[in-house]
Amino acid sequence: MNKMPTINTLDDVRQILTELPGPDLEAAGAAKMREPQLTKPAGSLGRLEQLAAWTATWQGRYPPRMKNPTAHVFAGNHGVVAQGVSAFPQDVTKQMVANFERGGAAINQICKALGVNLCIEQMDLDNPTQDFTQNPAMTDTECAAAIAFGMNVIDETSDVTCLGEMGIGNTTASAAICLALYGGSSLQWCGPGTGLDKPGIGRKAEVIGIGVNLYKAHMHDGLDVMRCLGGREMAAITGAIIGARLKKVPVMLDGFVSTAAAAVLPSLNKRALDHCKVGHVSQEPGHKVLLEKLGKVALQDQNMRLGECTGAVLAVALLKAAVACHNDMATFAEASVSTKSAES
């Protein structure tokens, strides 16, 4: 079992990010060698071919495997909700967690349908982060503790881990993180979240601008941005991404919030998200912009914006199909099928 490094401060996290393991080139090479031998025209399975190779590369083994996919939904509360940035009250976070645990939410049904093990991770729901228009959302110690928690929940036996969230107010935190990282306007990153109307979105953008301007001088990298503007559940997703890398588990990100949590890492290591794919593009408008900034292309677009890890888990079906085709299709030699002639 891979033992996780001890984390007490964000500087401990920064040190880990300088030493992330790279891709398994031997596994990548084996996948590249087999793909042209399979009974299909070259490239005819498109992105499925790339997904199979990516899975092997970041699992660090060949052939790739997709028998034990897992999903983690991290739940946290945000003090900035006091500024009227959400259409729903903060109590909904705890209520929805109870619904997850009873098996009544959309994520429960999708996990059941696709054979994905679901874990619900509660992040001190009775103690919201600070309202970032008044104080930094978290202290260094609090943020580091949430990151450490996320690192340690990753099961190294997972074939892929899907990362999602639940937290009233977290699209506000996500938009603030994106504005701090990439600039632009508050409105560029803002969306309806749980159902804000146009005036509500305007208020949300105003709150985001206040928070980002308040801490400009104190945010030197992505971890500072997370500390000042993020949430415990978001910091835990950041940690889970790091933990998965250390444990050789590929990551499937969900929508805007989980991608924003990931976005704080490239400022410290530009290869930090190479083991991550994005399951879907959210209808939350900031997600499309963020994916462009990160150079990521989502695997699907189903007009979803629920969160709960639903889009990430839905993408497991594509991973399962990709790995099954790569591993189990016959080769031209095995099937006695002629290969492309030299004259064609």
Image (tube, rainbow, N blue to C red):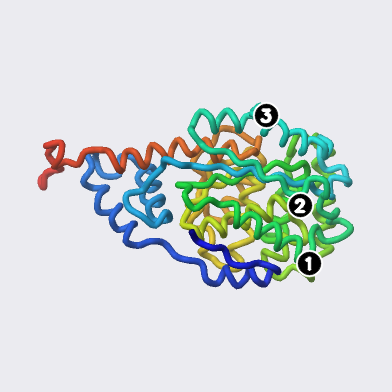
At horizontal 21% and vertical 46% (from top left) the residue drawn is 37
Decide which of 110, 148 is in the foreground and name it: 148
Amino acid type at circle 2 is Ser
Badge 2 marks a residue whose secondary structure is helix
Q: Position of residue 241 (x, y in %)?
A: 57, 55
Which disc is residue 53 wearing? none
What is the x, y in percent for residue 315? Answer: 49, 38
Q: Compare residues 240 and 86 and report the one nearer the observer.
A: 240
Q: Report the mark closest to the observer, 1 or 3.
A: 3
Q: Residue at x 86, y 56 (%)?
A: 133
- Residue 128 at x, y percent in the picture: 82, 49
Q: Tell me which amino acid carries mark 1.
A: Lys
**On the image, which quarter does residue 280 sit in?**
top right
Residue located beneath label 2 in the image: 186
Q: CA distance from mark 3 to mark 2?
A: 37 Å
Q: Is residue 329 left or right of residue 340?
A: right
Rendered view: 149 above or below 331: below
Q: Secondary structure at mark 1?
A: helix
Q: How many marks?
A: 3
Q: Which is more N-terminal, label 2 or label 3?
A: 3
Quadrant in the picture for the C terminus: top left
Comparing 20 with 126, the one in front is 126
The image quarter in which residue 177 lies = bottom right
Q: Secondary structure at mark 3?
A: helix
**Residue on which disc 3 sits:** 102
Q: Is residue 204 above or below residue 108?
A: below
152 sits left or right of 337 in the view: right
Q: Residues within 10 Å of mark 2 (few under 14, many from 20)?
A: many
Residue marked by disc 1 = 216
